[in-house]
Image (cartoon, rainbow, N blue to C red):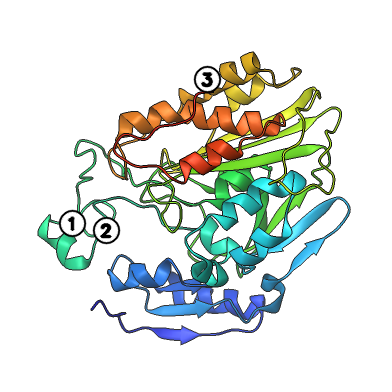
Amino acid sequence: MMRLPLFQFRAPRTLEEAVRILAGEGPAAMPIAGGTDLLPNMKRRQQVPKTLLSLRHIEPLTHMYFQKQFSRLGACVTLTEIASRFRNGFTALAQAASQVATPQIRNMATLGGNLCLDTRCNYYDQNYEWRKAIDFCLKKDGTVCWVAPGSAKCMAVSSTDTAPALIALGARVRLASLSEQREILLADLYNNDGLDYIKRRPDEILAEILLDNLHNWKSTYWKLRRRGSFDFPVLSVAAAVRFSTSGPTSGIPSSVPSSPSAGIVEEARIVIGSAASRPILATEAAKLLIGRTLTPDTICEAATQAAKIAKPLDNTDFDLSWRKKVTGEFVTYALRELAGHDTRPERHAITRLSPPTPQFPIL
């Protein structure tokens, strides 16, 4: 049985008190909300903070605020709450949250925790004794990245579901410390380095996620994993577009198909997740959609371009060359859904993959 190491536990009631504790304790302290990622990591001795700082009793962090021009989501809002509240322009976020792990974990896991999720790797996500037997790795206690021994940086993969969705929606985050509060684009929060993967400083707390008005936007999220539930993504695609004329989406749940939209795309974002140490914006692929309708030719062109930036490594599930190949197919599925096509058969097929020879529907 793997046991937690000894630690002190603090439970502040205000954000001001929390940032004071972090400033005083230094890097030896870590914030904890749901603990669904941090506590297993502590059992494996991947992270060994001396002090855990609970954020669950800071009431403003557990609420969502909706205003005409923007929305504010507290970092401690659970994924279950996110999955049940958002549709239309926010559909990608609801889909991403609903596909994390299991219902029991989503009841505990928080939006902020998923955004700060530690990077993952087959060599890193093992117990202490297993990692010691291979002489540890660059991410923890070692000096070599066993995925790419000649690399100077860690190649562990970003496996957050909600970050690609929120980046596609243009989200910003508010980081609070004792000295300042700063607001940055969520896309700028991450580094493409599995060890130094996040730009949140040890004395900072990710307090809020901010989203602008998403009128006339449609969004979606697609996830590849071995099993239809519980597993982390080994590939994810989030896409969002703003049409010049809105399609028939108002009040219609995302699970109900609508007729293809004839709108011209005015803005677009495509994000590839779980293919690198950070979510990757497929900027050039998104540019190909601007000023055009989502016809099959346009979708094919954008999907081909988006697949070029995916360079998966052999440190997660499935064959890496196959994961690169299906990147374009997943972008195609996402854009077809945004065009109004019924993609439920494809989603159903993806959840019933039978490795090692998965079969996808013919487009």
**Residue located beneath label 2 in the image:** 140
- Label 1 with label 2: CB-CB less than 8 Å: yes
Q: Circle 3: is it few (<14), some (14-19), or many (20+) Cα within 10 Å? A: some
| Residue lying farthest to the left in this orientation | 133
Element class at badge 2: loop
The three-letter code of the residue at mark 1 reads Phe
Residue at image mark 1? 136
Q: What residue is drawn where x is 31% and y is 34%?
A: 357
The residue that mark 3 highlights is 305
Circle nearer the N terminus (2, 3)? 2
| Left or right: residue 342 compared with residue 213 | left
Residue 28, picture quadrant: bottom left
Q: Does the rendering let one see residue 181?
A: no
Quadrant assignment, res 320 = top left
Discs 1/3, front: 3
Which residue is painted at 62% across and 21% down in the image?
299
For numbered disc 3, what is the local secondary structure? helix
Disc on the earlier residue, 1 or 3: 1
Distance in Å between CA atoms under marks 2 and 3? 35 Å
Q: Nearer the viewer, residue 115 or 347?
A: 347
For the residue marked with disc 2, what is the amino acid? Answer: Lys
Could you say which disc has been placed on residue 210 in the image? Answer: none
As measured in the structure, the alpha-carbon distance from the residue carrying label 1 to the one carrying label 2 is: 7 Å
